[in-house]
Amino acid sequence: MAIFSITSINKSLMAASMLLLGLVMSNFGITAAQSVGVCYGMLGNNLPSASEVISLYRSNNIRRMRLYDPNRAALEALRGSNIEVMLGVPNSELQSLANPSNANAWVQRNVLSFWPSVRFRYIAVGNEVSPVNGGTSHYAQFVLPALTNVFNAIRSAGLQDQIAVSIAIDMTLIGNSYPPSAGAFRDDVRRYLEPIIGHLSYARAPLLANIYTYFSYVGNPRDISLPYALLSSPSVVVWDGSRGYTNLFDAMLDSLYSAMERLGEWAALDVVVSESGWPSAGGSATSFDNARTYYSNLIRHVRGGTPKRPGRPIETYLFAMFDENQKNPELEKHFGVFYPNKQPKYNLNFAAERTWDISTEYNNTLPLISNM
């Protein structure tokens, strides 16, 4: 419990700031124990039924789920579970949802018909679409209209303050990431991203980002050490001015914050890490021990913050719930934190809590209140 001295702080100001903090934390659901969710992928022919999966989430105190499409069995099983859901719009549906009437029908069918017995937290309109990636570039023109149409449908239902509508990007859109303060989007994606991020700012929705230190490490093992990528370095590895980085995850996330700042007025936009994981087999630097280390360290670490934005939990979704044997290449089959037989692959403590340093948040509210 934090202890405050009020010798130099007016008591009424303290009360007002604490009330504001309580409202902020209540509105955004920011608590230490709730900062980690798990992605529920289904590309396997040996996976448990949806109802078994929901029971597994609940029994392991996993309170948030990313669902990549509106799977009916999963949505029905989620009713009354109290699990908060990030629901995905598959890339293949983006062109259809660029039509407002289709977006309204999609929201009615897949969201409103389940709300509020299913607790939708986000709708992710597309996943890792890039205007310069040949595999997804043909979807890029539909992302912004689909995003705005789904948002408008949610707003028409009066749920814009309960369900945020966003997109999920990957880090290939970042052109420069070192040092983190120099983070910038690629020049050839800025025209794509600027109106999207502008809309997210208007809608007060976070940007969703898939952040994998694994792929950065295997792409450059000469300059990136394994402990830095696994969040296991005991000391600062990279200094960026006065900010010290002990791990690559923080550096990548802060480079994304810096990239958004370079777009101008949207510097305060929040980021939710919509995927992060490490494969246990199938490729370079893949092993049971490396994956266990990464997931264990990440769960503990995201209950804090980054050097650029310290003191706040980083909402993060582990990828993924199960090993999925129908994915390719081989390493993609080995990201699960559970085996398909529902046995845990690692001893991960999803219920572990970090002491919340409320004094940090309290002090951060003082300038806001004093300027009112």
Image (cartoon, helix red, strand yellow):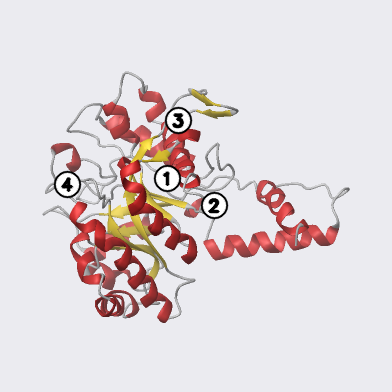
Measured in 3D between alpha carbons, the distance from the residue under mark 1 to the one under mark 3, in whole angstroms, is: 21 Å
Mark 4 Cα shell of 10 Å, populated few (<14), some (14-19), many (≥20): few
Tell me the mark number nearer the camera, choosing from 1 and 4: 4
Q: Nearer the viewer, mark 4 or mark 2?
A: 4
Closest to the camera, between mark 2 and mark 3, is 2
Give percent across and percent down for residue 147.
Answer: 34, 66
Secondary structure state at the residue bearing disc 3: loop
* Rendered image: mark on residue 349: 1
- The answer to whether residue 202 is visible is yes
- Which kind of residue does numbered mark 3 sit on? Asn
173 up-or-down from 214: above or below: below
When the figure is inspected, residue 122 is found, relative to residue 281, above or below; the finding is below
Identify the residue at horizontal 84%, vertical 52% (top origin): 9
Q: Tell me which label, 2 or 3, sits earlier in the chain.
A: 3
In terms of sequence position, does the residue under pointer 1 or pointer 4 come before the other? 4
Label 2: element kind? loop
Task: Give the Cα distance between marks 2 and 1.
Answer: 31 Å
Could you give the CA–CA distance between mark 1 and mark 4, rounded to whole angstroms? 39 Å
Q: Is residue 105 left or right of residue 315?
A: left
Amino acid type of disc 4?
A: Gly
Q: Are marks 4 and 3 in contact (CB under 8 Å)?
A: no
Of pointers 1 and 3, the one earlier in the residue sequence: 3
Where residue 71 sits in the image (x, y, percent)? Answer: 22, 67
Mark 3 highlights which residue? 247
Examine the image and state in which quarter residue 157 appears: bottom left
Within-10-Å neighbours for mark 1: few <14, some 14–19, many 20+: few
| Mark 2 Cα shell of 10 Å, populated few (<14), some (14-19), many (≥20) | few
Q: Position of residue 112 (x, y in %)?
A: 34, 79
